[in-house]
Amino acid sequence: MSLIDIDDLSLFLGQGARRRKILDSISFSVEAGQTYGLVGESGSGKSTVLRCIAGLYRQWTGGIAVDGQTFRQADRLGWCRNVQMVFQDPYGSLHPKHQIEDILAEPLHIHKLDNIGERVGKVLDQVGLPGKFRYRFPHQLSGGQRQRVAIARAMVLRPSIVLLDEPTSALDVSIQAEILNLFMDLREELKLTYLLVSHDLSVIDHMCSAFAVMQAGRIVEVLTRDALENNEASAPYTRTLIEASERYDRDLALRQAEAEQA
Amino acid sequence: MSDPILCVRNLNVRYFGARGAMHAVRNVSFEVGKEKVAIIGESGSGKSTVGRAVMRLLPDVARVEADALDFEGRNMLALSEKAMQDIRGRRISMILQDPKFSLNPVMTVGEQVSEAYLAHFPVSRAEARRRSIEQLAAVRIRDPEHVYGLYPHEVSGGMGQRIMIAMMLIPDPALIIADEPTSALDVTVRLQVLALLDDLVRQRGIGLLFISHDLNLVQSFCDRVLIMYAGQVVEELRADELDKARHEYSQGLLASLPRIGARRERLPTLNRRSEWALDLVRQK
Amino acid sequence: MSENSSSMSLREYLSSDTVTSMRQATAQRVYWSLRAFLGNPLAVFGLVVILAMILAAIFAPWIATHDPNAQNLSRALQPPGEENWLGTDELGRDIFSRIVYGSRISIYIVILVSVIVAPVGLVVGMAAGYFGGWVDRVLMRVTDIFLSFPSLILALAFAAALGPGIENAVIAISLTAWPSIARLARAETLTMRASDFIAAAQVSGASALRILRRHILPICVPSVIVRITLNMAGVLLTAAGLGFLGLGAQPPTPEWGAMTSAGRRFMIDSWWVVTMPGMAILVVALAFNLFGDGLRDVLDPRQSR
């Protein structure tokens, strides 16, 4: 049994004529301690999968289970304590009127945990933020520092699973490197399992041992890191995605345009 | 290299705000010929400010100074606002990151292209419409007749960017300044937009100033690269020689980039050194 | 610790980069907002007038030169002068004293309306915006119904039905004032509902009530305060209007609207009987508007011009 089991997950959104299938029979599983990737372009549904697992969408069909316990059976607070999420935009994911202290203490209050001051101090230390940030407001922090706060918020409940939704795509490359390193360190230190969504194959390759390629709500192909590096991708879409992300290639662009015309 | 289209020497931009002056761009010099020149840097490096300073699109609190800011042999600093508007409309075009903000939401995209056409050529509306559809086809939009009648919210990001390029090409510009034109696009769509820009440089002899944060992309797409840090160009080199960058900042930036197949436990991080921000010119 | 902060000057405490407590962070925020507010002379003028009015209301017995209800027919309709600064009315009552006491009634109405309207509007608007669906549809249709009545007419109908009096005037005004607050709160909530910080709170396991109270309310409150301040001018005018029509405060209560109404018979010969309370209404209404504008620039920078 795997830590995360997603089985035949489908989701429709909208009503009447605008009702659309967002996710189409998604199935995959993630082992404990693994970093599993979901890669795809905008509209592929990769972030939506995370939002379903986090409980932000409820109207899906199929099965989501963590540690053998399904989402529908689990009690909400217990699920939240075990499954946390880091969002893409560090500017939008922190409450603009809450101080860092409030932001980090809020989950602890919700779960009625004790030693709040101590836990907040510890988690700040774990994500590499000096204690002086504690009483700042988000707008006084840089993008990278904000993302560290968002990571600290996810870690403060000591979850076993952290869902990462494009956690570095809004950051500069040098900051991205620091944040990716931080994720690696925290995974070792806190024995975490990650589910990482990204449009950037090189980030996925750096972080994940295996990943699923998504397109238009479906999983096109599941690849391991070895298969990616040995050029063993078989689905045409995956191959295009890999080639297009590696470098600009005029011939590839022309071939792709022709394929679209046909 | 033949005569440069754009020649910038010792460009300085200072912002005068409530909290004192800020020297955003310091002694930046470069030339753009019939080629693809990239300005690369992280947020706050001043790369976008350079593009806007050339277009004279900076807010009033900014003061622009330069030893030379020549476009097609004319000194742009001496031009009146009216002459500058003329250059902005006809000879230099700008593409921004998100086309959705640049298009009028209540007009169909076709009407907007037609309007742009009518502004430059004395032709009938029917003729403008015909030419506009040709123009849309020229930027490799399939079924241009259909796209002509769509509103901006009905087109995808990649399509929107192609429409912006179509509009921009009408007056036959000599220089295109593209500020992160593909950052909001998916990789496969990005490829198409880049191929389009590539063709313009190759076939029409347009100069392209490509402002980006994406080292990987610039390396394979552009001819020359300027690397900016803290308002200065720390290094200038050929794009295919980017790996041989000598400045510590450029090297650090390249090393911190995740790459497929690199298999590193940790990515090297950048140790920003205070001397990088010192005035390079004064150092010499 | 305490030694440390006492050795630091107040100025350093307020502008220091290293914040060591929650209290200091809040103090700093208040300090910067205050500085921004004080940079706007019109808003400061508004604030001064409002403060003066509040002081006048509190210390009316000491400020007033006469008993506001004491009639002295031998000194009826005296022009402004030494003895009666703003003149006397047709019953010989001192207008200045009546205006001073009248400020109590105006403040009473304005505060009571705000206290009723703000919570009702916030609760209805936030619930409609956050829950959406049928909750939103029902609440907003109710809001629309109240919004579709012209406020003075509805207030008139209520005053007519419930009988004239200050309390009924307050109820009538409140009924017409809450929908605009509800709409504002709903619009604010809608823009926030899809934001990541609300999603993050949901992922933390926060209940809907907690999200509304801890996350949405703090963002709605400043714009609601601004709107209420701007509304106060309207409330004041409606109250005066009801008083003028005889449906608000009843004589001999020195209500400004009622005073102008009583004085209009003598307008030609004794202009001050109407003009003085009219001026009071004008100045205070203007002050609320200016103060509200200034407050908006500080609390809600997105909406400023």
Image (tube, coloured by chain):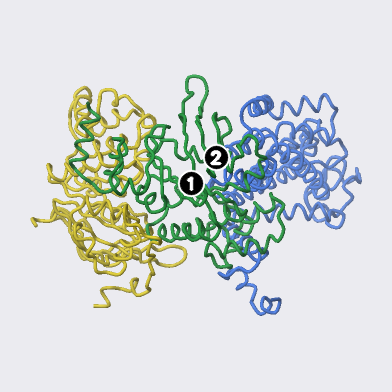
- Residue appearing at x 48%, y 46% in the figure: A195
**Of pointers 1 and 2, the one earlier in the residue sequence:** 2
Label 1: how many Cα within 10 Å (few below 14, some 14–19, many 20+): many
Label 2: how many Cα within 10 Å (few below 14, some 14–19, many 20+): many
Residue A195: mark in rendering = 1
Viewer-proximal residue among B267 and B183: B267
> Looking at numbered disc 1 in the image, what kind of residue is underneath it?
Leu
Viewer-proximal residue among C222 and C82: C222
Judged left or right of residue B11, residue C77 is right
Residue matched to label 2? A53
Residue B7 position in % (x across, y down):
17, 59
Evaluate if marks 1 and 2 touch, with contact meaning CB atoms under 8 Å apart: yes
The residue tagged with tag 1: helix, strand or loop? Answer: strand
The residue tagged with tag 2: helix, strand or loop? Answer: helix
Residue C228 position in % (x across, y down):
67, 43
Judged left or right of residue A45, residue B66 is left
Judged left or right of residue C127, residue C106 is right
**Which chain's colour is blue?**
C
**Which chain's colour is yellow?**
B
Chain A color in figure: green
Q: Residue C89 appears in which quarter of the rendering?
A: top right
